[in-house]
Amino acid sequence: MTGRKKHDKKDHAPRPAKSAYESDLERLQIELVAMQQWVISSGARVLVLFEGRDAAGKGGAIKRIIQYLNPRSARVVALSVPSEREKSQWYFQRYLEHLPAAGEIVLMDRSWYNRAGVEHVLGYCSPEQYELFLHQVPTLERMLVEDGIILQKYWFSVSDEEQQKRFESRLHDPMRRWKLSETDLLSIIKWEDYSRAKDDMFRVTDIPEAPWWTIESDDKKSARLNVISHLLSQLPWEKIEPEPIELPERPTADDYERPAKEQYKYVPDHAAELKSRG
């Protein structure tokens, strides 16, 4: 057994049954909706950072968190490679413009910690830029928290064996093949380098004002339940009863006549073809 596998070996807890998972996920998503109402009402600003190795399950967790939230006050930020102009800016600048305003929830699918991870490991930044980042980021995060932003940082931890399975699954899945990039392949070769980079990052940035929370994510379903449950426990939210709504009576039809259907273009009924096959 290699040192890497020994280091990453995990005790796997029993996976939740499908029915139990779906039931608890629904319960937690209902609470997320209630929590968002508190965020909107109180004017809270919530920023959640999702980090971890490639194929660690961040995207799936974010999808379940955002699924039923009001998109007017909850959004996902997943920035692409910086432009030449952005490269000339202060490193944090392009991230800071996406910070939440009052009543907003922002989920960052990877964040400024790219500099401590992929940029550092693959040489996309200089050693001086890397050291400057580690020097500045604790101060920046303290400033955000001092200003009233609720900041949560999650690290999704996946074993090398499970990551390999997920990469192989993507390779043979036409709907997810796009998720397998050159950077993903390098993450296999650079596994130990990423481990050291993560350890170094935690030593500097796991601060009391903005600690890192690790999510064991070899079981995606458990990881989703755990991160949602924890996020809900970290906000001082309370349930706000919505204003009562009474649906009006639908008025009786007047002399309006609907134009003939032949005047409009309708999408072909593809679903009807499937029904006929059944």
Image (tube, rainbow, N blue to C red):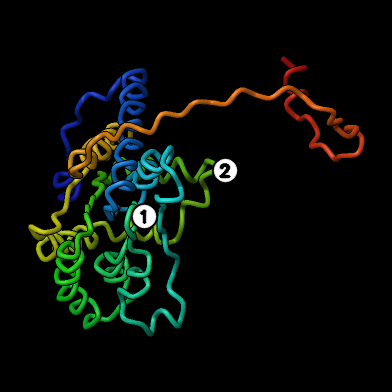
Is 260 left, or right, of 12 in this rendering?
right
- For the point 34% across and 68% down, the residue is 95
Q: For numbered disc 2, what is the local secondary structure?
A: loop
> Residue 7: where, in percent of width, then height?
14, 47
Which disc, if any, is residue 19? none
Image: 7 above or below 253: below
Q: Which residue is mark 2?
A: 174
Q: Nearer the viewer, residue 259 or 212?
A: 259
Q: Nearer the viewer, residue 25 or 97?
A: 97
Quadrant showing the C terminus: top right
Q: Position of residue 211 (x, y in %)?
A: 13, 55
Using the numbered discs, state the Cα–Cα distance from disc 1 to disc 2 in whole angstroms. Answer: 23 Å
Q: Nearer the viewer, mark 1 or mark 2?
A: 1
Instruction: Locate residue 117: give its quadrant.
Output: bottom left
Image quarter in which the N terminus is found: top left
Camera-side residue: 138 or 10?
Answer: 138
Relative to 223, say whether 16 is above or below. above
Q: Residue at x 21, y 54 (%)?
A: 150
10 Å neighbourhood of mark 1: few (<14), some, or many (≥20)? some
Compared across the picture, whether 25 is left or right of 235 comes to right
The image quarter containing residue 101 is bottom left
Q: Residue furthest top?
A: 278
Q: Residues within 10 Å of mark 2 (few under 14, many from 20)?
A: few
Q: Amino acid at mark 2?
A: Pro
Residue type (three-letter) at the residue carrying disc 1:
Asp
Residue that label 1 marks: 109
x%, y% of residue 230? 20, 39
Tell me the SS state at disc 1. strand
In the rendered view, would you say 202 is above or below 174?
below
